[in-house]
Image (tube, rainbow, N blue to C red):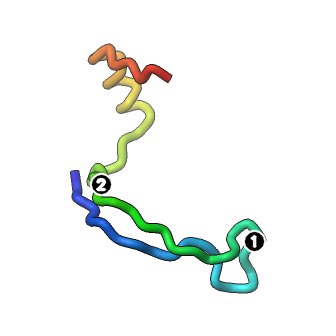
Amino acid sequence: MVRIPTGSFEIGGHFDGGKACERPVYAVELNTFYMDKNEVTVGWFRRFVEESRYADNL
């Protein structure tokens, strides 16, 4: 896992070529979070669920 520190960024389109739903540009503030360093495929996750009997309660 990789720690992503607290920070802010702008989201949206700064250019005229963007879609209407991409405007206006606005700032987003995120708290620190962790993200896997490597991607996980659907197949790997499916195997994990089956072998661990993981229940996501969705």
| Up/down of 25 relative to 53, above or below | below
- Horizontally, residue 38 falls left or right of residue 30, namely left
44 with respect to 37 (left or right): right
Which residue is labeled 1 in the image?
19
Instruction: Estimate how packed mark 1 is, as few (under 14), some (14 to 19) or many (20 or more) residues with alpha carbons within 10 Å.
Output: few
Which amino acid type corresponds to the residue marked 1 in the rendered image?
Answer: Lys
> Residue visible at 45% across and 20% down?
57
Of the numbered discs 1 and 2, the one sitting upstream in the chain is 1
- Residue 23 position (above or below residue 54): below
Q: Which quarter of the picture shows residue 6?
A: bottom left
Q: Are marks 1 and 2 in contact (CB under 8 Å)?
A: no
Placement of 40 over or under 45, stated as above or below: below
Tell me the quarter of the picture where residue 8 sits: bottom left
Please report the residue visible at 28 percent of the width from the left and 59 percent of the height from the top.
32
Foreground residue among 33 and 31: 31
- The local crowd at label 2, few if under 14, some if 14 to 19, many if 20 or more residues have their Cα within 10 Å, is few
Residue located 35% across and 21% down the image: 49
